[in-house]
Image (cartoon, rainbow, N blue to C red):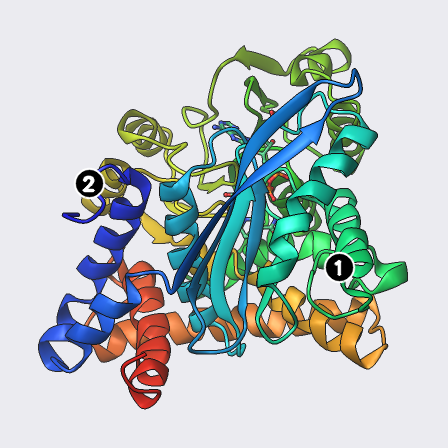
């Protein structure tokens, strides 16, 4: 806090982790200095990204890559293109990614990068020129054994394609480093779906321990990007009743619940970059709330899948009053600290993003194996691996919490369990590798 007093998101993420580790540090004082080192990113790279729009006008954005921790393997983590990107956001996401990768069994370190570039309203050519300029600098700092970026907000298969093309042109190497690629040239089946599907598999594990099932449960979902839409798809497949989605302009509430036909209509609206309001033209019972959030709608479970700090204290109160019993985070750190306090007091079971949304990085890990081996596994093979791994992650969180006396009865057990399991894995590797 003394070093980075203005980095609000980073301080928030650090505070949550430190709170979870109190019991670990008091029993294992040798880890105090490891934590101090772990909270300092290994390297921060900031660079200029100049690009020319379709009218010939010159622009400049700021590029970032925060290489947070390499103790478990090559840095791995997303690239985000969004005007809200700054160093604090990059550092919090780098720390979250380090711990997320730690809670899996992958040998991958943690990183995050991106730019304050606004992708909305850009043509394909503008997007390509921006990605090429971004890679013009980034390529010096990445490689299959060094740092292997993937997608995040504003970076999907199209952007990864342009980035990969430029990396290949600059290096003459067809290497296994960027993930979220298109399957015909090195991508993995089910990578776009993996975070959303994995989130719902994780939710199933949480419910099974409470003797419940997704079938018939009303779910509120925020966001309408990669994570939200595939979570919605899987919720419908399991017989749950998802009743909302949202975007940066507003939200749609359909009290009758979405089905596959409605989901396909929603996708069409988003793919054509139209307002979600369009949905009410064909579904007159649905409601569009301009600038609104879905948290006041009667529900059993909530899946915040848009962005950090989208769910604040009053949203949390609204969720509690709407009957919500379980919150499973699809986005990274979507709940503010005071929202979490409301969940704690109201005994809402809360599953943190660093465990529940780890399905994406797990399949990115499998994408790297497939790319370097020039092989491709089927969607069914990937899906059964994803289910297996999400269960493993859930059990790991539960076990770590139990070992430190935090039983499943505590609404915070999964967040503490995830932080403890991840920290111990990364910290042991750091201790064994000496003071580096
Ligand atoms: P996308 O860019 O595909 O979608 C983001 C969605 O969130 C869009 O619908 C966007 O609205 C909406 N959104 C963004 N900011 C806000 C805001 N402030 N208020 C309301 N809605 C907002 O991103 P992803 O789905 O890939 O990522 C979503 C979250 O999941 C992020 O936190 C990301 O870090 C996390 N995540 C993603 C993974 C992945 O594999 N993609 C893996 C693990 C975590 P609009 O359409 O109007 O822009």
Query: Label for residue 111?
Result: none
Which of 177 and 279 lies nearest the eye of the viewer?
177
Which of 37 and 307 lies nearest the eye of the viewer?
37
What residue did someone put label 2 on?
5
- Label 1: how many residues lie within 10 Å, few (<14), some (14-19) or many (20+)? many
Above or below — where is 218 with respect to 136?
above
Q: Quadrant of residue 225?
A: top right
What residue did someone put label 1 on?
190
* Residue that lies at the very extreme toward the right in this rendered image: 184
Q: Tag 1, which secondary structure? A: loop
**Left of 36 or right of it: where is 122?**
right
- Label 2: how many residues lie within 10 Å, few (<14), some (14-19) or many (20+)? few
Which of 195 and 56 lies nearest the eye of the viewer?
56
Q: Position of residue 112 (x, y in %)?
A: 50, 53
Q: Position of residue 231 (x, y in %)?
A: 62, 46
Q: Tag 2, which secondary structure? A: loop
Residue found at x 63% / y 24%: 59
Residue found at x 14% / y 66%: 22
Asked whether residue 131 is in view, the answer is yes
Above or below — where is 108 with respect to 137?
below
**Left of 68 or right of it: where is 290?**
right
The quarter of the image holding the C terminus is bottom left
Q: Quadrant of residue 243?
A: top right
**Which label's residue is closer to the chain start, 2 or 1?**
2
Q: Position of residue 224 (x, y in %)?
A: 62, 33
């Amino acid at each position: 806090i003394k070093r980075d007093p203005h980095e609000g998101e980073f301080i928030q993420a650090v505070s949550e982790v430190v709170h979870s580790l109190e019991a670990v540090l008091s029993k294992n004082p040798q880890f105090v200095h490891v934590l101090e080192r772990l909270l300092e990113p290994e390297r921060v790279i900031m660079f200029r990204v100049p690009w020319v729009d379709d009218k010939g006008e010159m622009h400049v954005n700021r590029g970032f890559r925060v290489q947070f921790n390499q103790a478990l393997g090559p840095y791995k983590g997303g690239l985000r293109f969004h005007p809200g990107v700054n160093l604090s956001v990059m550092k919090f996401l780098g720390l979250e990614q380090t711990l997320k990768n730690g809670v899996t069994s992958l040998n991958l370190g943690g990183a995050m990068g991106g730019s304050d570039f606004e992708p909305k309203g850009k043509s394909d050519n503008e997007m390509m020129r921006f990605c090429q300029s971004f890679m013009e600098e980034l390529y010096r700092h990445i490689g299959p054994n060094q740092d292997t970026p993937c997608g995040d907000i504003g970076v999907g298969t199209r952007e990864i394609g342009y980035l990969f093309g430029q990396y290949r042109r600059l290096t003459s190497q067809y290497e296994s480093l960027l993930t979220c690629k298109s399957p015909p040239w090195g991508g993995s089946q089910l990578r776009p779906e993996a975070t959303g599907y994995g989130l719902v598999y994780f939710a199933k594990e949480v419910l099974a321990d409470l003797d419940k099932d997704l079938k018939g449960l009303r779910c509120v979902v925020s966001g309408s990007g990669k994570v939200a839409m595939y979570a919605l798809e899987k919720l419908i497949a399991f017989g749950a009743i998802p009743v909302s989605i949202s975007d940066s302009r507003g939200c749609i509430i359909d009290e009758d619940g979405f089905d596959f036909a409605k989901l396909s209509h929603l996708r069409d609206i988003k793919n054509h970059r139209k307002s979600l309001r369009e949905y009410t033209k064909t579904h007159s019972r649905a409601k569009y709330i301009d600038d609104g959030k879905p948290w006041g709608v009667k529900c059993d479970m909530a899946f915040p899948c848009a962005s950090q700090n989208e769910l604040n204290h009053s949203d949390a109160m609204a969720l509690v009053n709407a009957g919500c019993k379980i919150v499973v985070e699809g986005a990274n750190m979507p709940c503010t600290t005071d929202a979490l306090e409301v969940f704690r007091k109201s005994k809402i079971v809360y599953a943190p993003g660093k465990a529940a949304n780890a399905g994406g990085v797990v399949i990115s890990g499998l994408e790297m194996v497939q790319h370097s081996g020039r092989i491709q596994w089927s969607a069914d093979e990937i899906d059964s691996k994803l289910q297996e791994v999400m269960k493993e992650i859930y059990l790991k969180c539960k076990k770590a919490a139990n070992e430190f006396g935090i039983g499943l009865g505590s609404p915070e057990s999964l967040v503490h369990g995830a932080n403890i399991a991840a920290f111990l894995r990364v910290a042991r590797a750091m201790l064994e590798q000496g003071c580096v």
